[in-house]
Image (tube, helix red, strand yellow):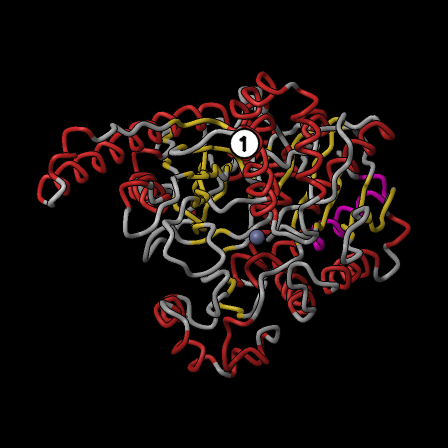
Amino acid sequence: MQNNWYQIVRDYTVRLVGIRSVNSTEGEVQVVEEVLRLLQSDGLDSAYTAIGLDPLPGDAFGRKNAYAFLRGKSPLTLVLLGHMDTVDTADYGPLEAWALDPAGLAERQDMLAALAPGLAEDLAAHPGDWMFGRGSADMKSGVAANIAVMRHLARMAREGRLPLSVVMLATVDEENESAGILQATYLLSRLRKQYRLQYLGAINTDYTTARYPGDTHRYIYTGTIGKLLPSFLMIGREAHVGIPFDGIDANLLAAELIRVLSMNDELCDVVGRQRTPPPVTLHMSDLKAHYDVQLPFMAYFYLNVLTFSTDPGQLLTRLQRVAEELMDAALKRIDDAERRWRQASDNSFQAESIQTRSGIVLTYAELCAQVAQQFGQERLDAELEKAWESCPPHLDARERALHMVRSVWKCSGRSGPAIVMYYSPPYYPHVAAIPCVLLDAVNATVEAHPELHLVVEEYYPYIADISYLRLDSGIDGTALTANMPTWQAADKPLHSGGYSLPLETIQDVGMPVVNLGPYGRGVHQSGEAVLTSYSFGRLPELICEVIERLG
Ligand SMILES: [Zn+2]
């Protein structure tokens, strides 16, 4: 069962798990430094064509990606990719002191099983084959496999036997906003020009897991899911609670919209046998800062929408239609309630004279266009600049987008009821599978190993850095950038807290992506564990087989 790779990958995994590298901490730097040491140890440093740390400019934590490049006999190049940051360890509760100590957790396996749902069943299914610890599955074992494979390839390169070229990247910040891979796209572009490379594609080694209880398959993905964060600002109308029909409760509009959008499986993308999980809200709130007896006249929420095929423009159009229908229905319901209430009250004489309510649903781009038309582009630009300047530093990126929308709304002079729809960051493009030699090599490798129960599926379902290695030609980015208030356009003054993606560089390096990673369970939970026989033994073999077929 165990082979040459097993002990090596196991050792690397334990060393990497032992370094605390929770996202947005300096630990992320220490762990990539260790990756570099492991790649170079035992005199292998001179075997690489280029190797080092690539800093993220202006990063608050001084973070860097680790990279290594081997120029083989051919300019055809494979990228081996993995992230080194993890989520926090507080979820380990009483066992937090051992969260980074696989042996310590193994000694306390019974206690861990009592804390972690489903762990006892998985332990029984594969006794003695799990390694515990934060980052063990997501995804330090994946990077450990990449390091082992890269060292193997470095020896081949030193002897002039490496048929193709290989870049290995260990990135930071995957668990937050993927600043690491976004920076790495520039490095990939630079390497390509400098060494005249042609990218065959990237193998990401992020975790894979069972899709249902008792699932014996091991999954390989040839694309990845995308994510958008459409956001809604509801504007009602203020009124004293004693005379509510004079106002519109913005929370009521939000509630109506959330009732229909959240968990709605009709909004799922379906491609082949795969289906995205339905949208859910990630946050909602009205904009009252304190208690009073006034109707809340502004509320907002943002919706997590996962995609296989829907692009930012299509989603916005679809959601706008839903919002318009709901607004009409909600306002009509208030009209009816008011009519009944007045008829039943003393002031029934007013029942017939009530004003029918109506509202409007606008996208942020439409709102801006109206303000520009009414007051001039210069006034709008000045208003936006003022909004940027009045934004408190370190404000959450979603709150910052909201702040911008509110400023433009105020400038418009309009009154509610209204809903303004816009995009908050981040945006992860979906990437579909495309016919290519990497895909052929993966399929041939899968066919050669029926004993491993490997299954190839198209979309990696857990959101990953590989979203930023290709922009599918069908994706129209203009609806995104025009409707994201904090989008930092290249030709506009630089604002701190602005959001941007190197869309041109992504298009420039654009390559097929595959996720061929370790098999784990319970990621982002205290029961996180990696199945060692597959992840330490089989995975590096599979990666090498794919590489052999590419060469
Ligand atoms: Zn991961």
**Disc 1 residue crowd, few under 14, some 14–19, many 20+, Cα 10 Å:** many
Image quarter where the C terminus lies is: top right
Quarter where residue 471 is shown: top right
The answer, for residue 143, to whether it is visible in the render is yes
Quarter where residue 388 is shown: top right
Q: In the rendered view, does 386 fall on the left or right side of 43?
A: left
In percent of width and height, residue 382 lies at 70, 30
Q: In the rendered view, does 532 fall on the left or right side of 244?
A: right
In percent of width and height, residue 438 lies at 60, 31
In percent of width and height, residue 343 lies at 10, 39
Residue at image point 54% right, 54% down: 518
In percent of width and height, residue 384 lies at 66, 33
Residue, disc 1: 431
Which residue is nearer to you in this view: 375 or 499?
375
Q: Examine the rendered structure and indicate whether residue 476 appears above or below residue 84.
A: above
Magenta residue check for 342: no
In the picture as drawn, the residue positioned furthest to the top comes out as 373
Which residue is nearer to you in this view: 408 or 261?
408
- Numbered range of the magenta stretch: 147-161
In the picture as drawn, the residue positioned furthest to the left comes out as 344
Residue at image point 58% right, 79% down: 98
Residue at image point 52% right, 80% down: 95
Residue at image point 27% right, 41% down: 245
The answer, for residue 448, to whether it is visible in the render is no
**Looking at the picture, which amino acid does disc 1 mark?**
Val
Which residue is nearer to you in this view: 527 or 73?
527
